[in-house]
Image (cartoon, helix red, strand yellow):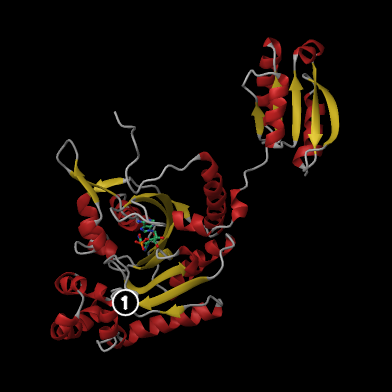
Amino acid sequence: MNNLKNLRGTVDLLPDQLIKWQNVEKIVLEQLARASINEIRTPILEMTELFIRGIGEETDVVSKEMYTFKDRGERSCTLRPEGTASVARALIQNGMLSNHPLQKLWYMGPMFRYERPQAGRQRQFHQLGVEFIGYDSVRSDVEIIALAWDILGKLGIKELNLEINTLGDLNDRLNFQKSFLKWLEINKNSLDLDSQNRICKNPLRILDSKNVQTQKLLENAPKLFNFLSEKSRKRYSNLKKNLEVLKIPYVENFKLVRGLDYYTHTAFEITSGSLGSQATVCGGGRYDDLIKQMGGPNTPAIGFAIGLERLILLAGREFEIPRNTDIYIINQGLIAESLAMDLSRKLRNYDLLVELDLSGASFSKQFKKANKLKPKSIIVIGDDEAVNGEFIIRLFDQSGNRNEQEIISFENDIKLENWINKNLLLN
Ligand code: HAM
């Protein structure tokens, strides 16, 4: 039999790699808590219809990329390709919008899209998403963009580009579409094949075609911006002013339409040149009609999602360093081993990182292992210590040289605590 392998586009995250993930996630979570955003967890598996109605049937995500299957009860299920539709469903279903019409929420977890895997693009990937529900002022657009920008900043990620655009409201887009469709019909034969197919299905997406000839042609096409109402235009210009006040640099990109159908007004992406072809680390925008369209009350909203794999690629090497072991306990002998086990539990109550050697190997082998790990201190417990009822704790400096040592009785918790406070917790 062949060895079993993971599915294409999925990845094992191994302990060494997860140190960076955990360090990065810690900073992200702190930043979210500081902004008073609450967590929400929705199922990974949803009814297929949720995404068809929420994201749009003709989008690439829904028409080409979903992991959809029938469960044993013949229901069509889909592994979530994104989080916004699920959050909207959960809020409506749990009646959360009547009591708390304003909500700031975040979620983190795996998403699934059947795309061609490449660097920075997987079939199972992870997103951190933030959704501001019930907010319609431009200030919420600015806060959401600032939040994404600051999360990336807190991680020391530099050379980022923020691209913004406005998609107007439904009316603006319908007006634009009429004129754009006319233009598309006339120019149909000069468009690339992909764009030709999109004319009936999703004409707005033609605007962000990667085809050079199509892009050139589009320069002469009607511009969505010219079809915006006075109100939509004002909103957009307010957004720009506010970003300038906060000194968040942006570039306008009128081709930015995003791949999901629910967006209205503000759309934005944050990209980094160092990510190669999959340059977008964060994408988001306003979706004022989604919740109503899904059967909920009329509720404006805006949000973004950061791709965690891309975030990890961008975060520096300083996040790869694990937390130092505070105490390594070397132990051997029947009674010694049980004393060591007891002591390790006591020490962990002080919020110390304690490694108890369970190898049963010789003292010298255990010492070798400990030296490799470079713990801040080492405790040795053998037969002598078991008989005498006390152990030695040795402190080391950063280069691994021994600093000082102390003999402490197994019973003397006060002496132990004082030593820990002085040597391990205050430094
Ligand atoms: P999205 O642009 O489809 O937006 O995805 C957001 C981010 O997820 C992307 O910018 C990228 O970093 C990451 N991502 C997407 N697909 C993949 C993949 N196959 N492999 C690795 N990373 C990927 C959304 O999903 C919206 N729900 C964002 C949003 C929230 N809009 C409003 N609220």
State ligand 1's quadrant.
Answer: bottom left
Mark 1, residue position: 167
Q: Amino acid at mark 1?
A: Leu
Secondary structure state at the residue bearing disc 1: loop
Quadrant of the rendered image containing residue 214:
bottom left
In the figure, residue 196 lies in which quadrant?
bottom left
Dot 1 alpha-carbon crowd within 10 angstroms: few under 14, some 14 to 19, many 20 or more = many
Q: Position of residue 90 (x, y in %)?
A: 32, 51
Closer to the camera in the image, 141 or 285: 285
36 or 206: nearer the viewer: 206
Q: Position of residue 217 (x, y in %)?
A: 25, 85
Judge whether 260 appears above or below 171 on screen. Answer: above
Residue positioned 50% across, 79% down in the render: 242
Quadrant of the frame with the N terminus: top left
**Residue visible at 21% across and 50% down in the picture:** 48
Q: Is residue 37 visible?
A: yes
Left or right side of 143 for 53: left
| Residue 239 seen in this snapshot | no
Q: Nearer the viewer, residue 88 or 285?
A: 285
